[in-house]
Amino acid sequence: MNTAPRRHWLPFLNKEVPADCATPTETAAFELKTGCESLRLRMPELELRSELGEGWRISGGTISGGETGLLYGVYAYLMAAAAGKPIAEAESRPRYALRMINCWDNMDGSVERGYSGRSLWFRDGRFSYDPVRLRQVARMLASVGLNVLCINNVNVHEPAQGLIDEFLPDTARLAALLRPFGVRLMLSVDFSQPMRHGGLPTADPLNKEVQRWWRDTADRVYAAIPDFAGLLVKADSEHRPGPFTYGRNHAEGANLLARALKPHGGVLVWRAFVYNCQQDWRDTKTDRPMAAYETYHPLDGQFDGNVILQVKNGPFDFQVREPISPTLLAMPRTNLAMELQLAQEYTGQQTDIYAMNPMWKELMEELREGGDPQLCAMAAVSNLGDESCVTGHPFAAVNLFGFGRFAWDPAAEPERVIADWVRLTYGFEGETQAALTALLMNSRAVYEKYTAPLGLNWMVTPNSHYGPNPSGYEYQSWGTYHRATREAVGIDRTDSGTGYLSQYPAALREKYGSADTCPDSLLLFFHRRRYGWVMPDGRTLIQRIYDDHFEGYAEAEKMAETLAALPLPEPDRSEALRKMALQLHNAREWRDVINSFFARLSGCADAQGRDLCADFDD
């Protein structure tokens, strides 16, 4: 599908940015004129102040900023006015220098874990895109302060190795389309690329020829793309090549590429998603969530200054709820980025509604409890695709918008961010704005109840990761177990179990170490409990499992009623209602499959007298 995307939160920018706008400053001037005419505003003056960098200041009828900061200031001014909150005096700087979108696009046009259609930039083994549409997407990213776009999958498949080689002129042309919006291009590379594309017999990071190959490659890339942001690498993970092949550690592997990039000001983003994906399910001591900490904590302080270790927000893999990854709290001498996932792999796949800002606020609170590490970057797996609304579900755009706001200012209140998106996107005010804002704010809690309450992870259908399958991963090699038996469920991750809890600082060890103080939402992640164990609210564990799934479905029904009453414009209304019907079907399936599973396994009746197995009996 190659139609122009709807403008989501930028409907007042009703003219395309012309191709002759070559810099963020030129784009800022165009956007200000266009926006002020559309919104009938008196146009402020623009003042280029290089010392402000990416920051901006609005004062006395003037918008000031560095070259990119000026553009961010213009967007902030126009969006505030469009949301009914005009800015007279304000100043802002981004909390994180690197605010990145990671796309998992393949050059055949597919998108790994993509739920918004096919790739926006690749098709049939080559670049293929609409320049106007690509600039519109870059405009959306810039409007919320996102400044780096990595366009290809971290699992680098052929012919994507050629993005820094035979396709480099095409890569440079795409980078030029992003440049006027202050969005810098990054690429994922394969660690073994010197062998695959360089003709070398090894990719050993301590080999001189390998080091020379990466230096020469970096020189060639920067000659073509002077503002190239750097490289992203997934190594020694899920069968990807890496330094372990040569008996080297990940600091040695990352520093190899970082030193090639350093003369050009580039960064090397190294993903910390490393674990044993060939685990024996009978092994109850090996605990996958411990893997990243065990790999990287001993290397703290050994990574070069332009390496950023990109760590998933939780120790598993973007589950509905996980605790904060202990690796983010254990490396004070290493540059760290938190990796989030806008693509709703385990959270509804852009069919079920799941607004993420409330989750991100909880993660930051957990980080502060654990010692408030100084992250230097934020990254998120993209939810972009070539469908007409770009994000698959019209409401999934709130997560792209919200991530930009969060990466700029992690202290921003989720409700305000979501309310701003509602007002900007649909022009809703008053009760209508409040109704959609509340629906989105509550959507995560509803989804969690009917899919994975109490920290119950990995009951999903294998491979697709959509829909319930209680035992789907239970006997596989991925290390993703809930260990449900006739008597109990959950993993003991305290000192008496796997010992995972010992990776946390004292404050979090104390919080999670006892089942009496552990939040209900993470109970079965950290503790194993019998079904008759009494929860703080007086219900047994098994009754909470039953009740939460029933309540989640009932709350999804209320969401559907609210949605049907909203005066959404077409085509968003039809698309949202169609997907809401699918969500209700999904929620009912989750409720019935999970409750039937536990009722049959435990033999425990429902205290409310509901026949949990009725729909599944012959």
Image: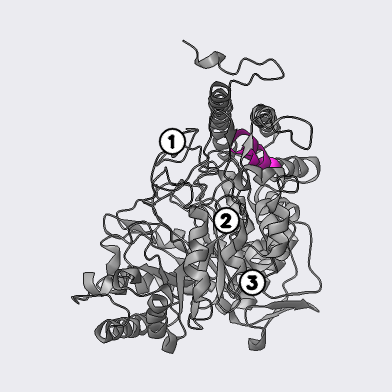
Q: What span is in magenta? A: 442-454
Amino acid beneath label 2: Gly
Give x and y (percent) for residue 395.
Answer: 60, 45
**Position of 208 relative to 327 (above/below):** below
Identify the residue under disc 2.
Answer: 499
Identity of the residue furthest to the top in this view: 618
Q: Quadrant of residue 249?
A: bottom left
First in sequence, mark 3 or 1: give its number. Answer: 3
Identify the residue under disc 3.
Answer: 72
**Mark linked to residue 13:** none
Give x and y (percent) for residue 381.
Answer: 50, 57
**Position of 348 relative to 155 (above/below):** above
Residue at image location 53% in from the left, 81% down from the top: 301
**Position of 268 relative to 532 (above/below):** below
**Mark linked to residue 472:** 1
* Along the line of sight, the residue nearer the viewer: 517 or 566: 517
- The answer to if 444 sits in the magenta stretch is yes
Identity of the residue furthest to the front in this view: 496
